[in-house]
């Protein structure tokens, strides 16, 4: 929620609000501007500035400039938009957008554990980022910086969650109670907002439940938006979405995912366009959708993120433990050695489920770039507690969510789809169309190959396979996207820094 560039000599200065940011000397602190947020400040010798969501119990980021020269950063518990921070000599630079810190991206500073997490889809929520000089301020964490002692970071204590499901009282109606909770959360999110409210609508159970509450509680017509996936799944998805849109009286926008394939030339994720590698897999298509939402007047977007987590089974309730994807055969020794550190320095249990926070870190900066503020009602503490407390029968297959939709009058086509939406056909098309050229590019210039994370011989094999029309394993995408993104950040650092740290302006 903040971007800043602080010089040590300005920390104890006379900070004032000027135009779009707080300023003193050569330093500045710029809040995200959104109808869903408010800025706060207490200026003086010990100055504190903050940005908070206007909804009750919403997220926040707070920055304190101490009279002793210590800068303290505190992140709220919901992790909606993490803050990325880097120290450079006498300066502390931070931003919700990691691209702003590209000057701190060096190939020699790559974190082996984080690189390996992304290569193998073993994602973890941590303060560690791809580059060791860039730190992520995670949900509930605190950070202190002083010109002599440097950065000190502390995770919060583990959050308490429901440890096991409870029995329902006789006559209890969990569907009605869930509807009441969801309506209250959505009401609080929308209360006081100006401008169009949008709801992402995939055609799935999570987003449909959010849309039901938004349509019932909004003072105006709700704008819905979604990507249409390819193949037969896309045809079924379009039917479901049309039923939901008509039933709720939504104003709908759609973007075909196949029109904006991942890693398309000229898109937002190419080696010559600076971008952070750990982002939304389908960013190209979602960027197009977010652009249409902004043009239609939306300023806040309700999402279905977090529904999977509050309806999931506990490890003890699963018939067999879940296993991560098999290791890709192209991992080189440096990545294999780093597998032992995959779980090192991870965040403790937080108020929001850790997998949801991983999604927030990857996707939410792109909402802010589009001028949109994302709100995920399923992450509200009261909904999370309720979902985790339910007997397993209500969580299995998201039975609770299905029954709530059925009670609103939606048919089984929506509540029990035979063919749920899937991006598999879109990803297959992207790899068929773009993998050959991108693999050839990796053989010419690749940070992952040069640093011993990926074997050159394996990439050459994949290149021949793509040239002969063979199918690509899905993890090829992860490798390509990671290599391209790292190169884009490192190229920007080399071009703009030349040994000194650099920062963007507050007016971007």
Image (spheres, rainbow, N blue to C red):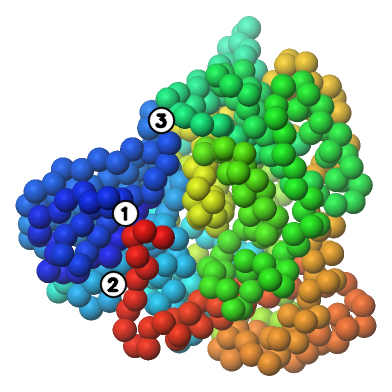
Q: Are marks 3 and 1 in contact (CB under 8 Å)?
A: no
Q: Position of residue 324 (x, y in %)?
A: 67, 61
Q: Position of residue 237 (x, y in %)?
A: 83, 39
- Above or below — where is 342 with respect to 462? above
Q: Which mark is residue 30?
A: 1
Q: Are marks 3 and 2 in contact (CB under 8 Å)?
A: no
Q: Which residue is mark 3?
A: 55
Which quadrant of the view contains residue 198?
A: top right
Q: Position of residue 190 (x, y in %)?
A: 49, 27
- Of callouts 3 and 2, which one flags the residue occurring earlier in the amino acid sequence? 3
- Above or below — where is 153 with respect to 215? below
Image check: 8 left or right of 253? left
Q: CA distance from mark 3 to mark 1?
A: 21 Å
Foreground: 14 or 453?
14
Q: Is label 1 in a helix, a strand or a loop?
A: strand
Quadrant housing the C terminus: bottom left
- Of callouts 3 and 1, which one flags the residue occurring earlier in the amino acid sequence? 1
Q: CA distance from mark 3 to mark 2?
A: 32 Å
Q: Which residue is mark 2?
A: 87
Which quadrant of the view contains residue 305?
A: top right
Which-is-in-front pick, marks 3 and 1?
A: 1
Q: CA distance from mark 2 to mark 1?
A: 18 Å
Q: Which mark is residue 10?
A: none
- Of callouts 2 and 1, which one flags the residue occurring earlier in the amino acid sequence? 1
- What's the residue at 20%, 57% (across, down)? 23
Which quadrant of the view contains residue 91?
A: bottom left
Image check: 33 left or right of 252? left
Residue 452 visible? no
Q: Is label 3 in a helix, a strand or a loop?
A: loop
């Amino acid at each position: 929620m903040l971007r800043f560039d602080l010089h040590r000599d300005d920390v104890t200065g006379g900070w004032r609000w000027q135009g779009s940011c707080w300023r003193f000397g050569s330093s500045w602190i710029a809040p995200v501007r959104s109808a869903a947020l408010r800025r706060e400040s207490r200026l003086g010798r010990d100055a504190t500035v903050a940005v908070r969501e206007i909804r009750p119990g919403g997220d926040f980021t707070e920055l304190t400039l101490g009279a002793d020269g210590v800068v303290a950063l505190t992140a709220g518990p919901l992790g909606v938009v993490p803050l990325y921070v880097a120290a450079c000599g006498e300066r502390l630079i931070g931003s919700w957008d990691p691209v702003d810190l590209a000057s701190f991206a060096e190939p020699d500073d790559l974190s082996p554990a984080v690189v390996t997490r992304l290569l193998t889809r073993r994602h973890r929520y941590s303060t560690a980022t791809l580059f060791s000089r860039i730190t992520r301020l995670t949900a509930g964490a605190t950070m202190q910086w002083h010109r002599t002692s440097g950065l000190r970071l502390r995770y919060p204590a583990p959050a308490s969650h429901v440890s096991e499901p409870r029995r329902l009282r006789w006559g209890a109606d969990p569907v009605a109670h869930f509807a009441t909770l969801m309506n209250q959360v959505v009401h609080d999110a929308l209360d006081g907002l100006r401008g169009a409210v949008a709801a992402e609508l995939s055609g799935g159970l999570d987003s449909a439940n959010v849309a039901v509450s938004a349509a019932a509680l909004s003072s105006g017509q709700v704008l819905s938006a979604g990507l249409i996936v390819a193949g037969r799944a896309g045809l079924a998805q379009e039917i479901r979405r049309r039923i939901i849109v008509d039933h709720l009286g939504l104003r709908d926008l759609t973007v075909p995912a196949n029109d904006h394939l991942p890693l398309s030339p000229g898109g937002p994720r190419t080696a010559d366009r600076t971008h952070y590698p750990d982002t939304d897999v389908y960013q190209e298509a979602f960027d197009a959708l977010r652009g249409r939402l902004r043009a239609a007047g939306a300023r806040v977007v309700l999402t279905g993120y977090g529904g999977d987590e509050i309806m999931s089974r506990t490890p003890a309730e699963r018939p067999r433990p879940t296993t991560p994807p098999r290791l890709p055969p192209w991992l080189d020794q440096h990545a294999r050695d780093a597998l032992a550190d995959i779980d090192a320095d991870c965040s403790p249990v937080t108020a929001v489920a850790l997998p949801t926070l991983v999604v927030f870190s990857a996707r939410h900066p792109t909402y802010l770039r589009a001028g949109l503020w994302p709100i995920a009602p399923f992450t509200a503490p009261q909904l999370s507690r309720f979902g985790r407390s339910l007997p397993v029968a209500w969580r299995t297959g998201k039975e609770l969510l299905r029954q709530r939709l059925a009670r609103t009058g939606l048919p089984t086509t929506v509540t029990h789809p035979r063919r749920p939406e899937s991006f598999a056909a879109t990803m297959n098309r992207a790899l068929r169309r773009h993998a050959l050229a991108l693999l050839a590019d990796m053989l010419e210039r690749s940070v992952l190959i040069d640093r011993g994370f990926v074997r050159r011989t394996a990439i050459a094999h994949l290149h021949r396979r793509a040239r002969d029309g063979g199918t690509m394993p899905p993890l090829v995408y992860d490798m390509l996207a990671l290599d391209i993104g790292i190169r884009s950040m490192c190229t920007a650092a080399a071009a703009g820094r030349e040994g000194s740290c650099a920062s963007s302006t507050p007016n971007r």
